[in-house]
Image (cartoon, coloured by chain):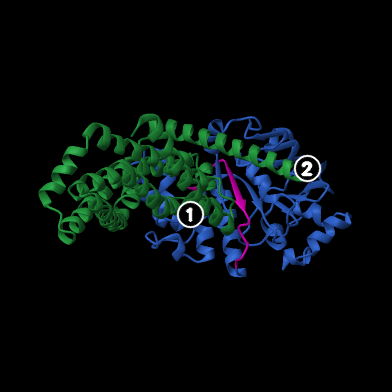
Chain colours: A green, B blue
């Protein structure tokens, strides 16, 4: 009986949380579309979330491209199809790995930092101080961060893919001896700009909205204690990562991206 | 929580300290003289009831101190006035505005009349002291940057923090944070100033300094001040009106009236800090 009751409460909490998130998203949307325009804050956040993530994105993109090329070559060479390595690496990175891994990396680095930062502001009553100064914390604190995450994600994803392609080229051509012309021509012929590249950017954009929203919402609703901020940060990483993977499946299944 | 009217006479026999300089005695707070009024307010956090039926009034332009034990709801009372938490029942009137059923957006207009000094400062930690004080002016006024700079320097000088505008909040001492928080709270010249534990964690000299600043602000701005405190001696020195939150009721009166009460719980609470003797120490 207790188990059923607990399950019921868990379901109620989940639905309430989902409702809270949707309401929070609507408030961010309204704040983004109404004055004042906080361009300076947006650029600052874009720097923190985007530019400061460049190194980790480049390094990880390079490593993923290299290992993908290595694994792809080992498989393709069995069928005498190693000339298609460029297509395998390119399509894997552009359609799937680029946006998904970028979203997961951004969640771990920038999403968790965003939650911790806002959660600390909650714990130290800074958001209450803003409210007492008649300033909406969602407008001032959450909206620039969520928008910056949304804008940064496609750019970071594109960078991840470019680094991955370069890493794949290095290993495939430089290490495994695949013909450079074959690598590039298979890549060019396999990748469609509209379906693959734009679709990939759209996917990254959706992931950016998702991660930005979850990270700011968890920060705003953090329990105002150090343990509460820690729990909110962990929750951001878990919930955003799982959401990205689930949304990835549905976007792929419904839109074929 | 049942409201008990003023105890004893209406005459304030508070002894004058040089820096206090309070003038007229505290009168019984009439509805017309009240700037903040609670009527039958119920407030609970989940199962924990903070106020069952709170009624009290805070006089216009005077220094009111809210006393009470830990968990008695002192800070919650200030947060109710600011609309940071909402009452489940009852009526709260702030400067003529009934705020109980106002939306968050509607509360922003009421909050323009309020200034709040938070217990731990609540300064924006990513901004310098200067920018912390300039922030509300930049948000809500059409002042030019030179005008804002002048206003900020004036406010900082008033609380004795001139010359350290470029420091970040984490580079300030506890007393400096309190003073900076007070400067930010008064920079928009509020009608009502809410101070949450302004004396906590300070050495005696800093307590005296904050007392002086609060009284000075009260004189200069003619603002109604509501101060939450555990500090009985400070309360007796600066208060015109005291509200003591007991578990089942609120007791109101001037410091002198409270000192003369025969209620053992009130006397016991005031004696905790050596008061009434402590009040004159």
Q: Residue drawn 64% across and 46% down?
A: B78
Q: Mark 2 points at which residue?
A: A1
Instruction: Give the secondary structure at mark 2.
Output: loop
Label 1 Cα neighbours within 10 Å, binned few <14 / some 14-19 / many ≥20: many
Lower sequence index among marks 1 and 2 = 2
Label 2 Cα neighbours within 10 Å, binned few <14 / some 14-19 / many ≥20: few
- Establish if B211 lies above or below A41: below
In the figure, is residue A188 to the left or right of A195? left
Residue A172 location in percent, x, y? 19, 56
Q: Name the residue under label 1.
A: A116
Q: Main secondary structure of the magenta part?
A: loop
In the figure, is residue B61 to the left or right of A34? right
Structural distance between the alpha carbons of marks 1 and 2 = 37 Å
Note whether residue B188 is visible.
no
Residue B4 quadrant:
top right
Residue B261 quadrant:
bottom right
The quarter of the rendered structure image containing the N terminus of chain A is top right
Q: Nearer the viewer, residue A184 or A206?
A: A184
Instruction: Give the secondary structure at mark 1.
Output: helix
Residue B187 in the magenta stretch? The answer is yes
Residue A256 location in percent, x, y? 35, 32
Q: Residue drawn 22% across and 44% down?
A: A87
> Which range of residues does the magenta coloring cover?
B186-202
Residue B24 in the magenta stretch? The answer is no
The quarter of the rendered structure image containing the C terminus of chain A is top left
The outermost residue toward the front is: A79
Please give the chain letter of the residue carrying mark 2: A
Residue B116 location in percent, x, y? 56, 48
Please give the chain letter of the residue carrying mark 1: A
Q: Nearer the viewer, residue A240 or A64?
A: A64
Residue A145 location in percent, x, y? 40, 44
Q: Nearer the viewer, residue A29 or B268?
A: A29
């Amino acid at each position: 009986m207790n188990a059923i009751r607990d399950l019921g409460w868990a379901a109620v909490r989940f639905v309430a949380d989902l409702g809270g998130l949707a309401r929070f998203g609507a408030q961010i949307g309204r704040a983004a579309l109404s004055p004042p325009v906080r361009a300076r804050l947006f650029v600052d956040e874009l720097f923190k979330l985007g530019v400061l993530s460049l190194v980790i994105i480049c390094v990880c993109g390079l490593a993923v491209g290299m290992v993908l090329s290595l694994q792809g070559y080992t498989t393709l060479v069995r069928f005498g199809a190693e000339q298609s390595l460029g297509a395998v690496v390119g399509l894997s990175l552009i359609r799937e790995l680029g946006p998904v891994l970028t979203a997961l990396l951004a969640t771990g680095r920038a999403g968790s930092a965003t939650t911790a930062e806002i959660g600390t502001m909650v714990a130290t009553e800074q958001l209450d101080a803003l409210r007492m100064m008649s300033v909406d914390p969602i407008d001032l604190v959450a909206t620039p961060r969520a928008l910056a995450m949304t804008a940064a994600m496609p750019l970071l994803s594109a960078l991840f893919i470019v680094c991955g392609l370069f890493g794949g080229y290095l290993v495939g051509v430089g290490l495994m001896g695949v013909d450079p012309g074959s690598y590039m021509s298979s890549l060019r012929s396999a990748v469609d700009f509209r379906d693959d590249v734009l679709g990939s950017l759209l996917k990254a954009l959706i992931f950016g909205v998702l991660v930005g929203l979850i990270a700011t919402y968890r920060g705003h609703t953090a329990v105002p204690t150090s343990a509460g901020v820690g729990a909110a940060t962990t929750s951001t990483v878990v919930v955003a990562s799982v959401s990205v993977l689930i949304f990835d499946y549905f976007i792929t299944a419904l839109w074929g991206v | 929580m049942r409201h008990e009217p003023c105890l004893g006479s209406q005459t304030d026999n508070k002894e004058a300290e040089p820096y206090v300089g309070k003038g007229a005695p505290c009168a019984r707070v009439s509805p017309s003289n009240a700037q903040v009024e609670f009527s039958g307010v119920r407030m609970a956090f989940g199962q924990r009831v903070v106020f069952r039926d709170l009624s009290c009034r805070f006089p216009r332009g005077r220094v009111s101190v809210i006393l009470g034990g830990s968990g008695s709801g002192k800070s919650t009372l200030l947060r109710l006035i600011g609309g940071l938490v909402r009452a489940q029942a009852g009526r709260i009137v702030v400067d003529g505005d009934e705020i109980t059923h106002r939306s968050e957006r509607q509360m922003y207009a009421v909050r323009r009349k309020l200034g709040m000094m938070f217990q731990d400062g609540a300064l924006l930690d990513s901004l310098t002291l200067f920018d912390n004080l300039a922030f509300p002016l930049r948000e809500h006024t059409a002042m030019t940057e030179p005008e804002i700079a002048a206003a900020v320097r004036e406010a900082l000088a008033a609380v004795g923090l001139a010359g350290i505008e470029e420091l970040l909040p984490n580079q300030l001492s506890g007393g400096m944070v309190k003073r900076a928080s007070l400067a930010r709270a008064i920079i928009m010249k509020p009608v009502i100033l809410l101070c949450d534990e302004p004396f906590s964690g300070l050495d005696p000299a800093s307590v005296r300094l904050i007392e002086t600043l609060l009284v000075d602000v009260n004189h200069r701005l003619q603002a109604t001040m509501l101060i939450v405190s555990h500090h009985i001696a400070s309360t007796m020195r600066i208060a015109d009106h005291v509200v003591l939150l007991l578990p089942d009721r609120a007791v109101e009166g001037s410091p002198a009236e409270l000192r003369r009460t025969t209620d053992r719980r009130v006397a016991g609470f005031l004696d905790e800090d050596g008061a009434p003797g402590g009040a004159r120490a």
